Image (spheres, helix red, strand yellow):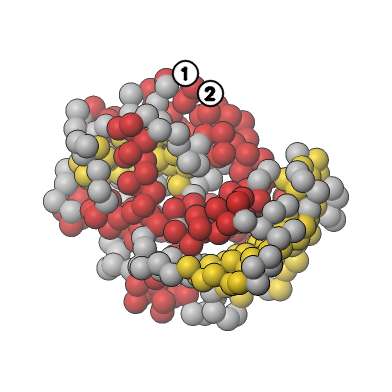
Amino acid sequence: MSLVGIGVIGAGRIAQAAHLPALARADGARLVGVCDPSELLARRVAARYEAPGYTSVDELLADDNVEAVIVAVPDRLHLPLASKALRAGKHVLVEKPLAGTVAEAEELRALVAETGLHLQVGAMKRYDPGVQHAAHAIQNKIGRILSATVWYRVMSGLRPSTEATLFPALVVDQDVRAREATFKANREQYLLTTHGAHVLDGMRYLLGDPTSLSAQMARAGNDLTWHGTASLAEGGLAHFEITANVHAEWSEGADIYGENGYVKLRTHFPFTLRASDVEVFDEANATSERAVFGDSNAYERQIEAFALAIRNNLPDSPSADDGVISVKLINAVAESSAQGGTKVTL
């Protein structure tokens, strides 16, 4: 298929560490522009990829080579920038969560329906081959789910040295970094939104939509954790945990017990570019299967799926509908934990 020309809006940390390297290697897509209001970031990051650099979103969107955009900016800017791109006739891959509030997410969903364009939410864990293998096994092999545990624990002291090893050299605008730090001052809201988007979308992807949930939050210094229980549509229960940070190695995964077997999923720090480890136990045959995958870049795979959806008019995953539900789940966790664990019906 012809390559989809993609512009990247936002040239900060996640764009430089994840989206731009992935786009440079993705099949079916090509980078045609980088935009950031910081002249330093726009100029130097675009030059690294030999692409045009813009400080104006309007100028990027006016480029006929730009067929779609990746919106790689903080969630408070998702609505204005994604809606501007959609109104300009561009398809959108927007970083998770879809938007900062439910109302904003629903506004974007309505605009997608109005324009008929593609919008994919950047919950890239769905494109981890191990996660996909686990989802298939849950849906087709182990039967109705009784019990599940899903967790996401962000490492603390080990993270800077790990990222320094795995990340490309980042271009940093210190003025932008200082300004963004003020928006992260509400650490509770920032961490729940940032990390909860992964956990809660992943839980839905593996287990389906919960019918209700309750959650509590605890704090030790600057470290926060949310633990919750979600009721599943077919009667089972799922426990979820979101912790930032743990003073240990990165830990992410799921244990899922069904009527006919068990799925064990262990996910690595995303920038190691390793597929998740997954094991499926089939009780009837008394066998355990461990799938083995080669190295895999979930960011690259999500861009390839985005390009394929555009060219072949395929469904978006996660879609705008998925994005709205994820924001509602984040809000439900915040609401329940603020009320000491009150049950929230979804």
Instruction: Please tell me which residue lies in front, 134 or 165.
Output: 134
**Residue 332 visible in the picture:** no
Name the amino acid type tagged 2: Ala
Other residues around mark 1 within 10 Å, as few (<14) / some (14–19) / many (≥20): few
Residue 20 in the image: above or below residue 152: above
Horizontal side of 129 relative to 3 (left or right) equals right
Residue 110 disc label: 2
Q: Quadrant of the C terminus?
A: top right
Q: Position of residue 280 (x, y in %)?
A: 59, 66
Q: Are marks 2 and 1 in contact (CB under 8 Å)?
A: yes
Mark linked to residue 143: none
Look at 75% across and 66% down and name the residue there. 218
Residue at x 19% of width, y 36% of height = 2
- Inspect the image, locate mark 1, and give the three-letter code of the amino acid beneath it: Glu
**For the point 30% across and 48% down, which residue is it?**
38
Q: Is residue 140 left or right of residue 47?
A: right
Query: 158 or 68: which is nearer to us?
Result: 68
In the displayed orientation, state which residue is furthest to the left: 50
Q: Which mark identifies residue 114?
A: 1
The picture quadrant where one finds residue 31 is top left
**Residue 159: image location, x then y, percent:** 47, 75
Eyeballing the image, is 326 above or below 218?
Answer: above
Q: Residue 1, percent across and down?
A: 22, 37
CA separation in Å, label 2 and label 1:
6 Å
